[in-house]
Amino acid sequence: MSMLDKHLSRFSQECRQLDADRWRLTLTNGTALTVSARRDEDFLLLDADSGLCPAPERLVPLLERSHELPAAVKFALRGSTAFRLRAEFPLPEEGGDAALRIREHLEGMRDALHRLHGWVSSEAVGSEVACPQLESGGQAIPGGLAEALKEAGWESHERPGGTLLADLETGRHFLQAEVEQCGVGTRFRVTLYRHESAGDAAQQVLSLYLLEANAALRYARAFLRREGDGVAAGFEVRTESPPSAAEAGHALAALSVAGRECAREMEVLKDGVVAGIYRSARLPFHPQRKGA
């Protein structure tokens, strides 16, 4: 039995190894969740059918709250009805933090399912909960974080207020990721979209696009937040504990890919005509499951 197999068995209620790189797990937290786990080079990929298919008008507030999901867990939309929970994360070396990271993400999948059921059935689905703040008010950035970025090969500089900025590798687009402490962990975030007067239809189309991007992108997850009367959106990577240099490097690489692949498309979706074409061209979104 490999060390990875032992960790997956330890932190799940049931673990069945399908081949050298694939497992089927059962997690329980009031509701059973079947999770597929697949090793792809240095990453472990987790995927599960949420068992829910929220109505289209609920996608915007759900995406607004997705920043509350643990670690790398995210909502993803694939096809017409498959509303999924996913998480991808780099595997530490054997004997390192592998057990900690696997436990964090499996517990995150359990917690995300519990939250999703609550959000879908609650009128409070759109309420905002801020990222946990440091006791010092979020002004101080641990020196180890800047060192982790430097060790990973990414230069950064600190701006007033304590947030670190790191240039992303996005070709023609000049994009920077904000890196800041979030609780005891870290959040890496790049904003790709701002619209001062996006209507309900535009926000729904943007949410559809972001949820589909979540299904295609590795490690990064979409966010959408209110800015006065407008909205901002982009992608983030969050860790529950201080990231290693390898994790910091993977996070910025993932945001670089998201910027290259999605920045132009998100900007184009501000055009109402284009947004309408996108909405009509994709598969119809039909909520079909009881309780959604």
Image (tube, rainbow, N blue to C red):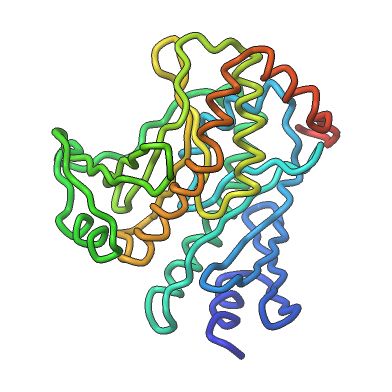
Where is residue 278, by image quadrant? top right
Residue 232 position within the rendered picture, expressed as x and y whole percent measured from the top left: 45, 24
Image check: 160 left or right of 261? left
Residue 161 position within the rendered picture, expressed as x and y whole percent measured from the top left: 16, 34
Note whether 226 is above or below 253 in the view shown: above
Position of the N terminus by quadrant: bottom right
Image check: 148 left or right of 16? left
Note whether 70 is above or below 259 in the view shown: below
- For this rendering, which residue is in front, 104 or 220? 220
- The structure residue drawn at horizontal position 62% and vertical position 61%, both measured from the top left corner, is 46
- For this rendering, which residue is in front, 186 or 188? 188
- The structure residue drawn at horizontal position 67% and vertical position 57%, both measured from the top left corner, is 47
Note whether 189 is above or below 248 in the view shown: above
- The structure residue drawn at horizontal position 29% and vertical position 53%, both measured from the top left corner, is 184
- For this rendering, which residue is in front, 235 or 96? 235
Note whether 149 is above or below 178 in the view shown: below
Residue 155 position within the rendered picture, expressed as x and y whole percent measured from the top left: 23, 53
Residue 167 position within the rendered picture, expressed as x and y whole percent measured from the top left: 31, 45
Position of the C terminus by quadrant: top right
